[in-house]
Amino acid sequence: MGNNPLKLQAKILLALLPLVIVPLALLAALESKLPAFAPRAMLLGLASIAVFIVLGSMVLRALLTRPLEALKQAAEQLGQGSQPGAIDVRRKDELGELADLISNAGRDLKQSGEKIRYFAYHDSLTRLPNRRLFSEYLKHALAHARRREQSLALLFLDLDDFKRVNDMLGHQAGDVVLRELSGRLLNCVRADDYVGRQFPNPTEGQTVARLGGDEFTILLPSISLPIEAATVAERVLKAVETPFLHGNSELNVGASVGITIYPNDGMDADTLIKNADMAMYHAKKLEKNTYQFYREAMNVAAVKRHTLENALRKAVERNELQLVYQPQAELKSGRIVVAEALLRWHHPHEGLIGPERFIPLAEETGLIAPIGEWIIHHACQQAGAWRAAGHHGLTVAINVSGVQFIRQDLVGLFQSALNESGLPPEAVEIELTETSILRAEQSIFKTLPALKELGIRVALDDFGTGRSSLSYLRQLPVDKLKIDTSFVRHITVDPKDAAIVSAILAMAENLKIPVVAEGVETNAQVEFLRRRNCSYIQGYIISRPVSGDVLPSMLAQAAVRE
Ligand code: C2E
Ligand code: MG
Ligand code: MG
């Protein structure tokens, strides 16, 4: 209250008022006793004092009251969070300093407000619009397209194996890729159009945004034909294909793109984003570095997948899973030395489902962890039972998914399964596919030595189908190679396959790593492999996968015909 400048001025005037009132009162009281000229002199004096007070009050107002009022107003604006306008106090004294301080604080406030607004709508790493801003653009662009009866395309991009970059080279390398990628995406959309950095009118060009992680979207707000979206997708995939530089090394990263079109595939923003995501997911399944248009059928597939996922969740507790065992025989002696555990699912409505249909789903959803635990436990129990029945030379081979290495304490799991079943560790072998290693390299490199230390052996499964077979042979403690069925199938008729299998066998012999040929079905294939010193074979020629109870009856027989 006391801070109000007007009141202050009034107080000062009140304080000065006695200067006029007191002489006037004195004059009235002493009028008869004073000489004749005195009243006039006194009145003159009083008039001067009055003039002095009026002038003083004007000066006071200019020097103190008005600046204080201006400062008060500015401080109030600052307190309300807005930037004060220009403060009309241009002085070199304390009031001037105060005015500068308030002005600077206002400027800082404005700048940090702009920053907060910017980062609420932009991704801090790439400076591209984020999901929030993108969704606003999309709604805006949809309204525009609707009014003009135009088509609009939405591209959804997701990097392939980006997690591998982060896992192998650290998050900094990942950040470098994402920043560089955002630049390349911006270059892919036409240069004369809007490119996501400024605050544009999104209806005028394409918008690139980062939705999070390695997910980007490109909005083509006005297209005449879907093929235009495909052209942009191709341009984008080509841009991603160029290796990314990190220090002195080159990183190869692929991408998958899903495309959806308004109004063909959906009318609102949420549906379009969902459909583009689904199309991207299908592109990922096809092959690396490709694009897919959304199709209605994808929705059906998604619903099916969802239903299957729910059923798989209950499969373990409902006892619907079963392990069957397929023998591997030593070629020289014909003895069955290993039985590979293969998973089957007895679906209540769909009947028997093979692992290739549901293992990838289990991996994606994380269900592989409880299922994998169940497999390890049951396979070891079964092998313990064979041993107890006197089949001491039989090893059980268990397929282990890369995801299990990431999600589970495999060493602990195997240790407790071995303890429970009383199985020696050398009676257990794990099979790892190259693709599965690729997805979980870090975890596998870390855990595999500990599993080896336990005494468990490691086989490299489906050898030749992955991308880096040879480097894994060098880096991982591999005890066995399993040549994939696809190479073995035609060895007797296709000279190329024959040459590949011969080369793998010769290389493995030099490395002193025994080889198992998978999917052997004919005597001619057995002969071919025998001549090239293949150690073991597995396939229908010996046996299809059978139940754990049936397997011992086969052990007595010579499995391979001479
Ligand atoms: P895999 O480990 O390479 O298993 C060999 C596959 O080839 C089995 O298919 C087997 O039934 C099949 N096969 C064996 N001999 C022949 C033959 O002579 N001709 C032909 N055409 N095929 C033959 P299955 O049981 O369908 O398993 C497929 C794949 O699923 C397995 O390939 C393995 O990668 C995966 N899988 C199976 N069980 C499990 C499991 O318990 N855990 C994990 N993570 N993966 C599993
Ligand atoms: Mg296998
Ligand atoms: Mg295999």
Image (cartoon, rainbow, N blue to C red):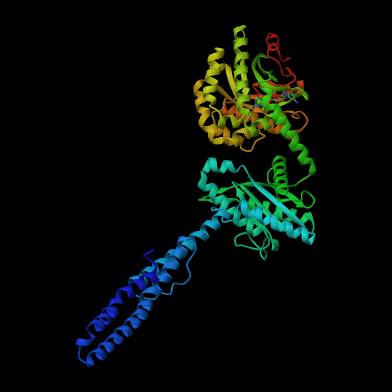
Q: Is residue 358 above or below residue 193?
A: above
Q: Between 144 and 192, which is closer to the camera in this rendering?
A: 144
Q: In screen coordinates, is 343 left or right of 225?
A: left
- Whether residue 348 is visible, yes or no, is yes
Residue 381 x/y as whole percent: 60, 14
Residue 521 x/y as whole percent: 76, 22
Q: Residue furthest front?
A: 32
- Whether residue 484 is visible, yes or no, is no
Give the quarter of the figure containing the C terminus.
Answer: top right
Residue 478 x/y as whole percent: 56, 27
Q: Is residue 292 above or below residue 118?
A: above
Give the quarter of the figure containing the N terminus.
Answer: bottom left
Q: In screen coordinates, is 401 left or right of 258?
A: left
Q: In screen coordinates, is 228 left or right of 367?
A: right
Q: Is residue 61 above or below residue 467?
A: below
Q: Residue at x 75, y 28 (%)?
A: 489
Q: Between 430 and 320, which is closer to the camera in this rendering?
A: 320
Q: Is residue 509 above or below residue 58?
A: above
Q: Between 135 and 450, which is closer to the camera in this rendering?
A: 135
